[in-house]
Protein backbone atom coordinates (compact mmCIF):
# COMPACT_ATOMS: atom_id res chain seq x y z
CA UNK A 1 0.00 0.00 0.00
CA UNK A 2 1.64 3.23 -1.16
CA UNK A 3 1.74 5.89 1.60
CA UNK A 4 0.59 8.76 -0.61
CA UNK A 5 -2.29 6.69 -1.99
CA UNK A 6 -3.28 5.66 1.53
CA UNK A 7 -3.32 9.31 2.60
CA UNK A 8 -5.47 10.15 -0.42
CA UNK A 9 -7.88 7.35 0.51
CA UNK A 10 -8.13 8.66 4.08
CA UNK A 11 -8.84 12.16 2.79
CA UNK A 12 -11.51 10.83 0.44
CA UNK A 13 -13.08 8.93 3.32
CA UNK A 14 -13.15 12.07 5.47
CA UNK A 15 -14.63 14.07 2.58
CA UNK A 16 -17.38 11.50 2.07
CA UNK A 17 -18.08 11.60 5.80
CA UNK A 18 -18.42 15.37 5.69
CA UNK A 19 -20.79 15.10 2.73
CA UNK A 20 -22.90 12.52 4.58
CA UNK A 21 -22.93 14.75 7.68
CA UNK A 22 -24.11 17.73 5.61
CA UNK A 23 -26.87 15.63 4.05
CA UNK A 24 -27.87 14.38 7.48
CA UNK A 25 -28.30 17.85 8.97
CA UNK A 26 -30.04 19.38 5.95
CA UNK A 27 -32.28 16.52 4.85
CA UNK A 28 -32.86 14.21 7.82
CA UNK A 29 -32.68 16.81 10.57
CA UNK A 30 -33.83 20.23 9.41
CA UNK A 31 -36.10 19.26 6.51
CA UNK A 32 -37.72 16.02 7.70
CA UNK A 33 -37.50 15.98 11.50
CA UNK A 34 -38.39 19.62 12.16
CA UNK A 35 -39.92 20.74 8.84
CA UNK A 36 -37.82 23.90 9.12
CA UNK A 37 -37.14 23.92 5.38
CA UNK A 38 -39.02 22.53 2.39
CA UNK A 39 -36.75 21.19 -0.35
CA UNK A 40 -37.57 21.04 -4.06
CA UNK A 41 -38.40 17.53 -5.34
CA UNK A 42 -35.20 17.28 -7.37
CA UNK A 43 -32.98 18.26 -4.45
CA UNK A 44 -34.92 15.92 -2.17
CA UNK A 45 -34.30 13.04 -4.58
CA UNK A 46 -30.56 13.80 -4.64
CA UNK A 47 -30.26 14.04 -0.85
CA UNK A 48 -32.41 10.95 -0.37
CA UNK A 49 -30.13 8.97 -2.67
CA UNK A 50 -26.97 10.29 -1.02
CA UNK A 51 -28.37 9.30 2.38
CA UNK A 52 -28.98 5.79 1.07
CA UNK A 53 -25.56 5.19 -0.49
CA UNK A 54 -23.50 6.93 2.20
CA UNK A 55 -25.29 5.81 5.40
CA UNK A 56 -28.00 3.26 4.62
CA UNK A 57 -30.25 5.17 7.04
CA UNK A 58 -34.01 4.88 6.66
CA UNK A 59 -35.18 8.50 7.05
CA UNK A 60 -38.35 7.71 9.01
CA UNK A 61 -36.28 5.79 11.57
CA UNK A 62 -33.78 8.62 12.00
CA UNK A 63 -36.62 11.10 12.35
CA UNK A 64 -38.36 8.96 14.98
CA UNK A 65 -35.21 8.68 17.08
CA UNK A 66 -34.53 12.39 16.88
CA UNK A 67 -38.07 13.47 17.66
CA UNK A 68 -38.09 11.16 20.67
CA UNK A 69 -34.88 12.83 21.83
CA UNK A 70 -36.63 16.21 21.75
CA UNK A 71 -39.69 14.82 23.50
CA UNK A 72 -37.61 13.36 26.37
CA UNK A 73 -34.40 15.38 26.42
CA UNK A 74 -32.05 14.14 29.14
CA UNK A 75 -34.84 12.39 31.02
CA UNK A 76 -35.92 8.72 30.95
CA UNK A 77 -37.02 7.99 27.40
CA UNK A 78 -34.23 9.94 25.72
CA UNK A 79 -32.67 7.48 23.23
CA UNK A 80 -29.12 8.75 23.70
CA UNK A 81 -28.61 11.03 26.69
CA UNK A 82 -25.08 11.02 28.18
CA UNK A 83 -26.63 12.23 31.44
CA UNK A 84 -28.55 8.96 31.65
CA UNK A 85 -26.43 6.46 29.73
CA UNK A 86 -23.03 7.97 30.43
CA UNK A 87 -20.73 9.84 28.04
CA UNK A 88 -18.77 6.86 26.72
CA UNK A 89 -21.91 4.76 26.25
CA UNK A 90 -23.27 7.44 23.89
CA UNK A 91 -20.02 8.42 22.19
CA UNK A 92 -18.92 4.84 21.50
CA UNK A 93 -22.24 3.00 21.49
CA UNK A 94 -24.63 5.44 19.87
CA UNK A 95 -25.41 3.00 17.05
CA UNK A 96 -26.82 0.46 19.50
CA UNK A 97 -28.84 3.11 21.34
CA UNK A 98 -30.18 4.41 18.01
CA UNK A 99 -31.25 0.97 16.88
CA UNK A 100 -33.32 0.34 20.01
CA UNK A 101 -35.79 2.95 18.78
CA UNK A 102 -35.17 2.66 15.04
CA UNK A 103 -35.98 -1.06 15.04
CA UNK A 104 -39.16 -0.65 17.07
CA UNK A 105 -42.08 -0.28 14.60
CA UNK A 106 -44.40 1.11 17.27
CA UNK A 107 -42.03 3.94 18.18
CA UNK A 108 -41.29 4.71 14.53
CA UNK A 109 -45.02 4.88 13.84
CA UNK A 110 -45.57 7.12 16.86
CA UNK A 111 -42.83 9.63 16.14
CA UNK A 112 -42.69 9.53 12.33
CA UNK A 113 -46.26 8.80 11.29
CA UNK A 114 -46.02 11.59 8.70
CA UNK A 115 -43.30 9.66 6.84
CA UNK A 116 -44.81 6.34 5.77
CA UNK A 117 -42.81 4.12 3.44
CA UNK A 118 -43.54 4.83 -0.21
CA UNK A 119 -42.89 2.86 -3.38
CA UNK A 120 -39.30 4.08 -3.64
CA UNK A 121 -38.64 2.94 -0.07
CA UNK A 122 -40.04 -0.51 -0.74
CA UNK A 123 -38.12 -0.87 -4.00
CA UNK A 124 -34.80 0.73 -3.01
CA UNK A 125 -34.31 2.91 0.01
CA UNK A 126 -35.34 0.40 2.68
CA UNK A 127 -32.61 -1.93 1.39
CA UNK A 128 -29.77 -0.46 3.45
CA UNK A 129 -27.16 -3.04 2.45
CA UNK A 130 -27.82 -2.43 -1.22
CA UNK A 131 -27.30 1.31 -0.80
CA UNK A 132 -24.15 0.88 1.25
CA UNK A 133 -22.87 -1.71 -1.21
CA UNK A 134 -23.33 0.72 -4.08
CA UNK A 135 -21.51 3.44 -2.17
CA UNK A 136 -18.57 1.16 -1.39
CA UNK A 137 -18.52 -0.13 -4.97
CA UNK A 138 -18.22 3.45 -6.22
CA UNK A 139 -15.23 4.10 -3.95
CA UNK A 140 -13.62 0.85 -5.07
CA UNK A 141 -14.22 1.73 -8.72
CA UNK A 142 -12.53 5.12 -8.26
CA UNK A 143 -9.71 4.19 -5.86
CA UNK A 144 -9.24 0.47 -6.41
CA UNK A 145 -10.12 -2.35 -3.99
CA UNK A 146 -7.64 -1.68 -1.17
CA UNK A 147 -7.89 2.09 -1.12
CA UNK A 148 -11.61 2.09 -1.80
CA UNK A 149 -12.22 -0.13 1.23
CA UNK A 150 -9.88 2.04 3.31
CA UNK A 151 -11.83 5.16 2.33
CA UNK A 152 -15.11 3.40 3.16
CA UNK A 153 -13.78 2.38 6.59
CA UNK A 154 -12.57 5.91 7.36
CA UNK A 155 -15.92 7.34 6.29
CA UNK A 156 -17.88 4.87 8.41
CA UNK A 157 -15.87 5.44 11.59
CA UNK A 158 -15.75 9.21 11.13
CA UNK A 159 -19.46 9.56 10.39
CA UNK A 160 -20.51 7.42 13.35
CA UNK A 161 -18.20 9.20 15.79
CA UNK A 162 -19.23 12.67 14.63
CA UNK A 163 -22.92 11.91 14.87
CA UNK A 164 -22.45 10.34 18.28
CA UNK A 165 -20.52 13.43 19.41
CA UNK A 166 -23.49 15.67 18.63
CA UNK A 167 -25.38 13.80 21.36
CA UNK A 168 -22.49 13.00 23.72
CA UNK A 169 -20.45 16.21 23.58
CA UNK A 170 -23.53 18.30 22.80
CA UNK A 171 -25.05 17.45 26.16
CA UNK A 172 -21.84 17.43 28.22
CA UNK A 173 -19.39 20.22 27.31
CA UNK A 174 -19.72 23.69 25.86
CA UNK A 175 -21.48 26.99 26.32
CA UNK A 176 -25.13 27.40 27.24
CA UNK A 177 -26.38 30.79 26.07
CA UNK A 178 -29.97 29.53 26.30
CA UNK A 179 -31.70 27.85 29.22
CA UNK A 180 -31.66 24.20 28.16
CA UNK A 181 -29.49 21.18 28.86
CA UNK A 182 -27.70 21.13 25.50
CA UNK A 183 -24.40 22.90 24.81
CA UNK A 184 -22.66 24.71 21.98
CA UNK A 185 -19.23 23.60 20.73
CA UNK A 186 -17.75 25.77 17.97
CA UNK A 187 -15.20 23.08 17.10
CA UNK A 188 -17.83 20.37 16.87
CA UNK A 189 -20.01 22.66 14.76
CA UNK A 190 -17.16 23.03 12.26
CA UNK A 191 -16.96 19.29 11.63
CA UNK A 192 -20.70 18.53 11.80
CA UNK A 193 -22.09 21.17 9.43
CA UNK A 194 -23.45 23.23 12.33
CA UNK A 195 -24.84 20.43 14.49
CA UNK A 196 -22.41 21.27 17.29
CA UNK A 197 -24.46 24.40 18.00
CA UNK A 198 -26.71 22.11 19.96
CA UNK A 199 -27.81 24.54 22.66
CA UNK A 200 -29.02 26.90 19.94
CA UNK A 201 -30.90 24.08 18.28
CA UNK A 202 -32.72 23.05 21.43
CA UNK A 203 -33.64 26.68 22.03
CA UNK A 204 -35.20 26.95 18.56
CA UNK A 205 -35.65 23.44 17.10
CA UNK A 206 -37.82 24.59 14.18
CA UNK A 207 -35.24 27.11 12.98
CA UNK A 208 -33.43 26.12 9.79
CA UNK A 209 -30.45 28.06 11.10
CA UNK A 210 -28.40 26.92 14.09
CA UNK A 211 -25.85 29.76 14.17
CA UNK A 212 -27.17 32.61 16.30
CA UNK A 213 -24.12 34.71 17.15
CA UNK A 214 -21.00 36.01 15.46
CA UNK A 215 -18.24 33.46 15.19
CA UNK A 216 -20.67 30.56 14.92
CA UNK A 217 -20.35 28.73 11.60
CA UNK A 218 -23.25 26.65 10.34
CA UNK A 219 -22.46 24.96 7.01
CA UNK A 220 -25.90 23.38 6.92
CA UNK A 221 -27.51 26.81 6.96
CA UNK A 222 -25.13 28.09 4.27
CA UNK A 223 -26.18 25.17 2.06
CA UNK A 224 -29.87 25.88 2.68
CA UNK A 225 -29.31 29.56 1.99
CA UNK A 226 -27.65 28.76 -1.34
CA UNK A 227 -30.43 26.33 -2.25
CA UNK A 228 -33.01 29.00 -1.43
CA UNK A 229 -31.24 31.50 -3.69
CA UNK A 230 -31.46 28.95 -6.51
CA UNK A 231 -35.17 28.36 -5.86
CA UNK A 232 -34.57 24.85 -4.54
CA UNK A 233 -35.61 25.44 -0.92
CA UNK A 234 -38.19 27.38 1.07
CA UNK A 235 -37.30 28.28 4.64
CA UNK A 236 -40.31 27.88 6.89
CA UNK A 237 -38.80 29.16 10.14
CA UNK A 238 -39.45 32.86 10.60
CA UNK A 239 -36.37 33.14 12.77
CA UNK A 240 -34.15 31.98 9.91
CA UNK A 241 -36.00 34.06 7.31
CA UNK A 242 -35.20 37.27 9.20
CA UNK A 243 -31.47 36.67 8.74
CA UNK A 244 -30.05 37.68 5.38
CA UNK A 245 -26.33 37.33 6.02
CA UNK A 246 -24.42 34.47 7.70
CA UNK A 247 -23.38 35.50 11.19
CA UNK A 248 -19.85 34.32 10.60
CA UNK A 249 -19.37 36.70 7.68
Image: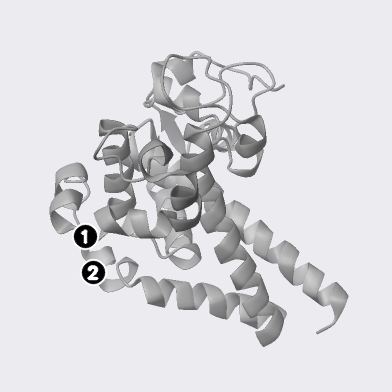
User: What residue does disc 1 label?
Assistant: 118
The quarter of the image holding the N terminus is bottom right
Residue 163's label in the rendered image is: none
Q: Is residue 191 rendered to the left or right of residue 167?
A: right
Q: Position of residue 41 (x, y in %)?
A: 37, 48
Q: Position of residue 9 (x, y in %)?
A: 73, 71
Of 76 and 1, the residue lying toward us? 76
User: What residue does disc 2 label?
Assistant: 122
Q: Is mark 1 on a helix, strand or loop?
A: loop
Find out whether the residues at labels 2 and 1 contact each other: C-beta distance under 8 Å: yes
Residue at 66% x, 86% y: name it. Answer: 145
Q: Position of residue 72 (x, y in %)?
A: 27, 33
Q: Where is residue 217 in the image (x, y as percent from the top left)?
A: 65, 29
Q: Is residue 131 rendered to the left or right of residue 136?
A: left
Q: Is residue 74 above or below residue 93?
A: above
Q: Is residue 56 above or below residue 25?
A: below
Amino acid sequence: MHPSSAVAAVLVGLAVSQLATLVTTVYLHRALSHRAVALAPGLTAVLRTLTWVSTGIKPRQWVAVHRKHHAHTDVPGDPHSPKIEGFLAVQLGNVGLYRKVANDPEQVQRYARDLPADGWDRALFDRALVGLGLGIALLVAVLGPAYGLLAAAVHTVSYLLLNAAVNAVGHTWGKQPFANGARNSLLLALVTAGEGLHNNHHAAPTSARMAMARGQIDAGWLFIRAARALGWATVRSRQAERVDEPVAA
